[in-house]
């Protein structure tokens, strides 16, 4: 897969505003600020296509990026940001559910979690939903550049045990700094792309 012209298409809150097309969509789910936009940028080799931010809680829309004529990346609003109101949390739930339950282009999910920490309650809930829906998913533990090599095995075990990942669920470490894990992400996406 050689990517020449990845581009931001649009942002949406409601289904009526999703772009119309026939390509497969790969959605990214994860905590607010976990590094979803940075992952997208690293994978498509662009510095600023997807909006990154050092402030948690900014992406409150569903963002669509067309990756040539291969597929779309769909960046879902990040969950688990404590400083939002109950109403905002409900709005978030409606937005995510609206997309995940009804989008016929959706083929697979990248569940992005922080390699440094034990998966949160929200991560577990998201993973359980993926399993229940029988949705193909790759668990991506990002920011691996921030932990020591000697800690990797321990973190991998903690993450897999906490989420309840079995040997059939694909898992990879990732770093938007070093590019580690990029090939694994491509290999996974390749299964859904012509
Ligand atoms: P999003 O809210 O999930 O889209 O998160 P962003 O991609 O905006 O990233 C949030 C912050 O984490 C930014 O300051 C990024 O520079 C940083 N970040 C993201 N991925 C990595 C990574 O792999 N390694 C390191 N060291 N920092 C990262």
Image: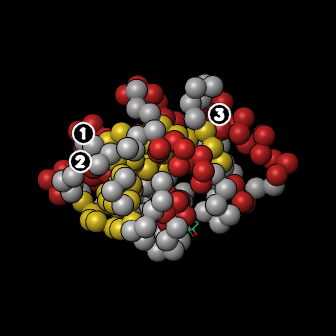
User: Residue 99 in the image: x percent, y percent?
Assistant: 27, 45
Residue 166 in picture, x, y percent from top left:
61, 25
**Which residue is nearer to you in this view: 90 or 4?**
4
- Residues marked 2 and 1 touching at CB (< 8 Å): no
Q: Secondary structure at mark 3?
A: helix
| Place of residue 167 in the rendered image (x, y in percent of width and height, measured from the top left) | 63, 25
Q: Left or right: where does residue 16 sit relative to residue 29?
A: left
Left or right relative to 101: residue 2: right
User: Residue extending furthest bottom?
Assistant: 48
Residue at image mark 3: 160
Q: Position of residue 8 (x, y in %)?
A: 34, 67
Residue at x 47%, y 45% (from the top left corner):
189
Tell me the CA gap for discs 3 and 2.
Answer: 34 Å
- Picture disc at residue 104: 1
Residue appearing at x 32%, y 42% in the figure: 106
Q: Point out the quarter of the image occupied by ligand 1.
A: bottom right
Q: Is residue 159 above or below residue 28?
A: above
Q: Kindly report the distance in space between the C-alpha atoms of the residues bearing marks 3 and 1.
A: 29 Å
CB at disc 1 and ligand 1 closer than 8 Å: no
The numbered mark, 3 or 1, whose residue comes first in the sequence reads: 1
The tag earlier along the polypeptide, 2 or 1, is: 2
Closer to the eye: label 3 or 2:
2
Name the colouring of the figure.
secondary structure
Q: Which mark's residue is nearer the viewer, 3 or 1? A: 1
* Quadrant the C terminus occupies: top left
Which residue is most to the right? 150
Disc number at residue 22? 2
Element on which disc 1 rests? loop
Q: Earlier in the sequence, mark 3 or mark 2?
A: 2
Disc 2 from disc 1: Cα separation: 9 Å
Label 2 environment density (alpha carbons within 10 Å; few <14, some 14–19, many ≥20): few
Residue at 73% x, 42% y: name it: 155
């Amino acid at each position: 897969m050689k990517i020449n012209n990845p581009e931001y298409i649009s942002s949406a809150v409601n289904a009526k505003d999703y772009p119309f097309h026939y390509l497969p969509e790969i959605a990214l789910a994860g905590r607010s600020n976990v590094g979803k936009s940075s992952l997208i940028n690293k994978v498509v080799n662009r510095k600023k296509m997807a909006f990154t931010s050092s402030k948690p809680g900014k992406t409150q829309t569903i963002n669509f990026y067309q990756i040539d004529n291969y597929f779309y990346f769909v960046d879902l609003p990040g969950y688990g940001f404590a400083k939002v109101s109950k109403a905002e949390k409900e709005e978030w739930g409606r937005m995510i559910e609206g997309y995940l339950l009804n989008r016929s282009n959706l083929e697979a999910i990248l569940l992005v979690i922080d390699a440094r920490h034990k998966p949160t309650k929200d991560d577990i809930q998201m993973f359980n939903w993926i399993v229940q829906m029988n949705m193909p998913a790759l668990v991506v533990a990002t920011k691996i550049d921030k932990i020591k090599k000697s800690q990797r095995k321990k973190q991998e075990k903690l993450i897999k045990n906490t989420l309840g990942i079995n040997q059939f669920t694909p898992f990879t470490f990732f770093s938007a700094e070093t590019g580690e894990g990029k090939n694994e992400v491509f290999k996974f996406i390749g299964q859904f792309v012509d």
